[in-house]
Each structure stands twice: as C-alpha cells, then as structure tokens.
Amino acid sequence: MKKLFTLLGCLSFFLQLVPLASYGQCANQITVNYYNNGVLTSQTINNGQSGTGASVCPTAGAQYTFNGSSTSNAVLTWARVITHGATPGADVVEIINSAPLTAGNTLSTTVSFTTATEYRLESDANAYGGCNKDGFVYFTFTPALSLSSSGTSSTTGVCAGSSVTLTASGASSGGYTWKANGVTVPGQNSATLSVTPAVTTTYTVEATTSCGQSSQQITIPVKDVTIAPAAPAICPSQSTTLTASYSGTSATYQWFIKGDATVRSTGSSLTVTPATTTTYQVVATTADCNTITRDVTVTVGPQKISVSTGPSAAICPGGSVPLTATSDNPGATFTWSPNTGLNTTTGATVTASPTANTTYTVTATTPCGATATSQVTVSIVSPTFAVTPSTPSTCAGDAVTLTASSGGITNTTYKWYNTTNLGTLLSSSATFSPAPVANTTYRVITATPCGNNSQDVTVTVNAKPTVSVSPTSATTDPTTSTTLTASGSGPYAWTATTGGNTIPLAATTASITVSPKYTTTYAVTTTNAAGCSATAQALVTVSRPLPVTLVSFEAAWAGKTPVLTWATASEKNSAYFDIERSFNGEGFEAVGRVTAAGNANARINYQFADQSLRLPAAGQVYYRLNQVDVTGERTYSPVQTLTTAKEGAAFEATAYPNPFDSKVAVQLFTPQAGDVALTLHNLMGQTVLTHTLTATPGTQEVVLPLADRLPAGIYYLTVRQGNTQQVLRLSHR
C-alpha cells in the first residue's frame, strides 16, 4: 500500500481555489495530507472548494491512502467523483467511506486507479458540529500510464469467451509489454490488446513513460458458477448441502446425479445423503450468459487413506530430528508411538530425540474411522572417519584420487592441506586428486555435526623410467630402411602413426628397422616394475616425387561390403592399383586389382568393393593402395581403417522416382544419430551438388535441393554417414 503517492518518482501538484458561498461564520477548515514532489504537505482549505491535480507514475496493483481532517466537528466523507457538477450538490459521486469526527481527527481512505480519477472530501459541520458550513476539496489523479477496458464490468464481469479490449496510453518509447496472470503475452507490444478470457484473469501492462518505468493492472472477472463445499467428504448416513452461486446477474438451477436425467432440485441448493461416493451436476441457466454446467463429487467413507513419513533419519548422540507424516486425506489425524524421545505423540509433525535406534509408527485416522500406518527409523550414528586408499601410490606427476568419508553423516565438510603448508587450502570436497612428484603427506580435516577429525595420508611416489630413441628424426625415401634404437631399462612396446592412424607393432626389442612408405611417427614405451611408464618418439619423414598424385582415399561400408574409393589429380606411367587388406595393420595381402589410367592430367575416380571379406568376430580391418607404375615401382597410400561391418549393416538409402523429371527424394534408414552427407557427381566425376542433414535413428526422407536445375543425364549420388556409405545411380530425364 502506498500512502498517497509516496512511491512515485514523477509527481507534481497544482491547486485551483474556487470559493463557495459562505455557510456561516464558524470555522470549518479542511486539512488534507498529500505528497508534493516527494515532500509530505499538509494543505488547509479555508471554508471553500479547491481543485488539486497530480500526475503519478504508477506501479501495478498499488494502493494510495489519503488522510483528511477538519478544524470543526464534522461528518467527513470520501467519495469518487463520477460526474463533476457545477456545484457540489450537482456532483454524481460514489461514496467510499464516511464518519462523524471531532475537530482534528483524521478520516483515511485507500484507493487504486488505472485511469484519471477524481476524488472528493466533504466536511459537513452543519450535520455534526452545529456549524452552518459545508466544505469540499477535490483531487484529480492522472497516471502517466493508464489502462482501461471495454466490454466488462469490474463487479459483474464478462461471459466466458467474450471479447474484451484493453487500452493503454502514456508510453514514451519502446511500446508496451502485456502479461496475463503474470505470464508475458508474446508478440504484443501495441497500445491495445484484445482478449477472450475463459476464467477471471488479471492483465498487466508495462511501459517506459515520461517519469520512468510504470505499470498498471486490471482484473477481468469472468462470470461463473461455483459450488460450496467444493469437495465434500462425509461418513456413511451423513448428509451435506450443496449450494450453487452465480457471479453474474441471475440464474436458475437444475441439479442432477451425473449421468442421470432425473432432476433432483430446481433451487440453488441440494441436500444429499448418498450411500456411496457420488458426483452431482448443476446446470445453471443464466440471464446474461450461456448455460454453465459444474460438477461436484461427494466422497462417502469409510474413506481410503494412506500415510507416508519420508526416509529414515540419522542423528548424532544427543541430537533431534523433526518427523513429518503426510496423508492423502485432508481430514486425517495422526498419533505416534512409542512416545520414547518424542516431544508429543499427536500431530502431523513431531520432534524425535531418542537415545538409541528407534522405529516410530504413525497412525493416520480419517473422520470415518479408516486408518493407515507408516514407520520411520531414527538411528543414532557416530562418525567413522576414513581415507581411501589408506596407502596410496602413484607415478611421479600422475594424479592419484584420495577420498575422505565420515560414515554417512550428512552436512559433513572436508578441507585438504599439504602437511608442509597448512595455511593453504588445497580442496574442500570429499575427493581430492593431487599429482605429486615426490612422496607427500596430505591432511584432511573432516567436520561433522557429531564431531571433527584430522587424518594424514602419505602418497608414495614411484619414479618413472627413462627412455629415449635415436635418431629422434630422420628423412628417407620409400626404398630405404631406417633403424631406430631405444635406450632405457625396457621392456619396449612400439607403435607407428601414419595419417592419424596408430598401429601397434609386434617388435619388443630395443632396435627396430622400418621402411615406411609415408611419413610416420614411431613411439616406444617402457614400463617399470612399479607400473610407471615413459614414452619417446621419432619422426621418419618419407620424401619422393610420386608418379601418381593421389588426392583422396576413403573406405566405407556399403551394407556389409567395404567399398574403397580414391581419386588421382594426375598420373604418369601408372599401370594398376593393388588393393591390400590387413587384420593387424602390419601384414597386408592383395585382395583385388584395378587398372590405372596410365597417363592423365585430369581427375580420375576409382572404386573397389571387397566382396571376398569374411569378417572376424570383432576387431578392425585395414586397407591401403599399392600403386604400381609401368616400371614396377610401387607407392603405398596411407592406411584406412574400418570397424566390423555390423555397425553399418543396417544403413540403407534409396531414391525415387528414378528416373526423375523435376524432383527426386532420398529415403534413409540410419541405425544411429549423426550427420549424413549427400554428394552428387556427374559422369565426369565433377561434384554438382552437396547436402548435409542431421539424422536421427530410424527412417527419414530428404528431397535433393535444386535437382530440377540439373541437365538431363546420368549422375551418381554418394550417401555417407561416418564410415558407412551407399552409391546410387540416378537418371534425370
């Protein structure tokens, strides 16, 4: 509530005195308190009428209080002016409140308004004080933001679904924001809002005005029928009276048992004594709205009931815990047992302070005698402090995870420190993962409601082995071998990484001789008895001019068959490509041959399907190209890796109609989510269209964009997801 306009940031007053005819010589001065530019002012009106105007910056739902008094004994009356007449006697007003008061006593009134509103205070000394004077003072309040409605009454409201127009004014910039029951109405920022409320709704408008941010609200009541009581519950043989009321002009009523056309009553009330739970229905024929039907269910006991108490609780010795029972029957009462450690044995909530583990039983009883029980156990717990592992170890610089516990006590806090520097907090969680380089002792301080504890744990740090490889880098060609030698304590494990693919090597010796066809990074790892390891790397760069410029090489599944595709930008004296396969990344065997173009200065596309593959139960399949020129010289491509075809076996793509005229659609079945790339090539191998979509597991369909603009002819559409692809032949007529 606001006293006058104390909340307002933008406020100004002006007074216009209009003398009235004198009613006598006795004093009848009216004093009204109000705020003038934020300063409380007492205005005394000497035996006359005054007009006071104020511009206010409103807040939605705000109320304003006016205080008035007279220097004479008088009847003071606050009123809202509906029509301002030429004289006070000609005014049309709505009386707000009135009281006979002795001189100096105050009459207050509290009001709210959304549009410009005039209020009047009358001091009639003749009616109470015996002084022949009647004085008046007028206040007109104009909100910087106003809100009005059409098609509704603030008392009777509107019919459900009727149209109401709300109109706001006063925004200086940015338009208006509308809300219905506090929820923003999207896409509406104009000065008017048309609504058709189904239930009584409060609308709020917000805007930036000349005096800052303002808001107003108005409630549109919707005429409705209500039944009291709303959810009656009775015991067998009891009666209850149902009463319907209509918030509109008037209504006539008919009562029924729901589903039965027999009229039970034609009045606003119906008294019933049902033997079982029964739903009654009232049909109200209104004088000003449509017919309204409402239901009410009378529940007859013995009523079903359930009760719950929540989870068991654990407390420290000497502690207490509140226990709360809830029931689905609002009339239920509760009793608790045993009474050991309870502050009371009745009520939904009790406080338990047992000295030993105790199971409490709560019994809920309905007014009709039905009962239900539930149990909750309160345990007395003492903290059990521990750190796991108790004898931790790690390799130098590697993280080790330490976990502190208190035996399940809630509201426990932890603080970890290095015992050599207890002033620096390292962690405040139960789990701590340091990475020491030398033996280190850590201390955890555990605080619980049942007591505190401090524990030290020493992390043993094992040294890592040392390993190096020589040379660390070398440059060679495909026909030359390179020997790499590791130094350290061994044993050794070697890997080779080419083109992003890492393959473990079978060699375990300190020296290995390698002949990579492409630049390869070799890594050697040694592990000591403590389980700590170290790794060194050597880069072997392969440099040679190639007779064939390979621009792409890919492997993908087409159903259960691996399909290899590659392309060359140019070829010189190229004889053929051998496709080689391996199951361990080391031992490759030829599984097919594709004749090369010989000599070419344009892009050439190749494809090979490995129809002879018999998949292992699990694992990976490796492929590479062995390009052979007319002189017998060989060049190997990077290795491509595929997982077992089971992952891609369900992938399927079909196109229809095919041939097509203006539109072609691709139907996909994808076993997993992920991007699907569609690439369309012409017979020259040129890419003429690409499209990517994000697929979900299952069947989906996509129409190739701009397909109608393609020249007539044959095209190949590659549909690929991950390492799985399918190539479709399309014909455009």
Image: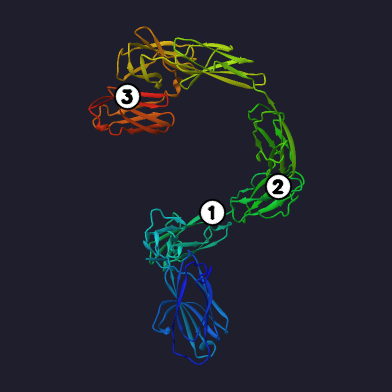
Amino acid type, mark 1: Thr
- The crowd level at tag 2 (other Cα within 10 Å; few <14, some 14-19, many 20+) is some
Q: Earlier in the sequence, mark 2 or mark 1?
A: 1
**Whether label 2 touches label 3, CB < 8 Å:** no
Which residue in the structure is indicated by mark 1?
276
Q: Residue 630: horizontal and vertical position, in percent?
A: 34, 8
Name which residue lies at 69% across and 55% down: 346
Amino acid type, mark 3: Leu
Calculate the distance from the C-alpha at mark 2 to the C-alpha at mark 1.
35 Å
Which residue in the structure is indicated by mark 3?
728
Amino acid type, mark 2: Tyr
On screen, residue 263 above or below 342: below
**Whether label 1 touches label 3, CB < 8 Å:** no
Calculate the distance from the C-alpha at mark 2 to the C-alpha at mark 3.
73 Å
Left or right of 665, for residue 418 = right
On screen, residue 71 above or below 630: below
Q: Secondary structure at mark 2?
A: strand
Left or right of 593, for residue 323 = right
Q: Nearer the viewer, mark 2 or mark 3?
A: 3
In-front residue for pair 441/475? 475
Q: Secondary structure at mark 3?
A: strand
